[in-house]
Image (tube, helix red, strand yellow):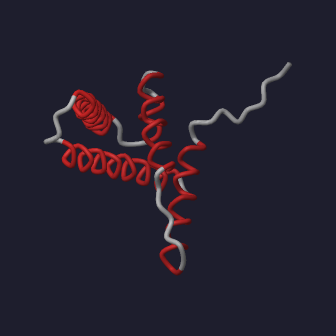
Amino acid sequence: MTEEELDEYFICTLKKILVEVKECKDYVKDLHTPEYDEINADYDEQIEELSSILKEVSSVDDLAQMDEETITAVYDFIADYADNFLIAPDGEQQEKDWAEYDKLEELLDLFMDTEEEEV
């Protein structure tokens, strides 16, 4: 992907993650046990954090200017999304899903330090 395509995909992915978190929150919002109260609080924190990040960041370079805690949080959001990404079992959709997953991996690779350390 070009840098512009990567930036667009990055923001699109963060928006998809935010939608999913909101859907999960909506699904459990009426459940009130100590465990679900904690889950709801976690969802609220994730929604607030993602919303804030999306207001401040419009590219990968913008994210690189953020503090380490924010960068780590974004990596974790994307990694969790990738870990739970569903691939269709066969057909044309499977090919599309694998192509999408390859893009997610490319995005995650941006967070990895690939330079070898000198000894």
Question: Toward the viewer: 103 or 55?
Answer: 103
Residue at left offset 57%, top offset 58%? 102
Q: Is residue 58 above or below residue 13?
A: above
Which residue lies most toward the bottom here? Answer: 91
Question: Toward the viewer: 13 or 22?
Answer: 22
Q: Quadrant of the N terminus?
A: bottom right
In this rendering, position of residue 51 left or right of residue 10: left
Residue at left offset 54%, top offset 77%? 90
Quarter location, residue 39: top left
Which residue lies most toward the right here? Answer: 119
Which percent across, then down, holds residue 107? 53, 47
Question: Toward the viewer: 90 or 69?
Answer: 90
Which percent across, then down, holds residue 23? 24, 50
Which residue lies most toward the top here? Answer: 119
Residue at left offset 51%, top offset 65%? 87
In this rendering, position of residue 77 left or right of residue 29: right
In this rendering, position of residue 96 left or right of residue 45: right
Total marks in image: 0
Which percent across, then down, holds residue 70? 41, 27
Q: In this view, does 86 lie above or below 69?
A: below
Q: Quadrant of the C terminus?
A: top right
Residue at left offset 48%, top offset 29%? 72
Which residue lies most toward the left here? Answer: 30
Which percent across, then down, holds residue 43? 27, 36
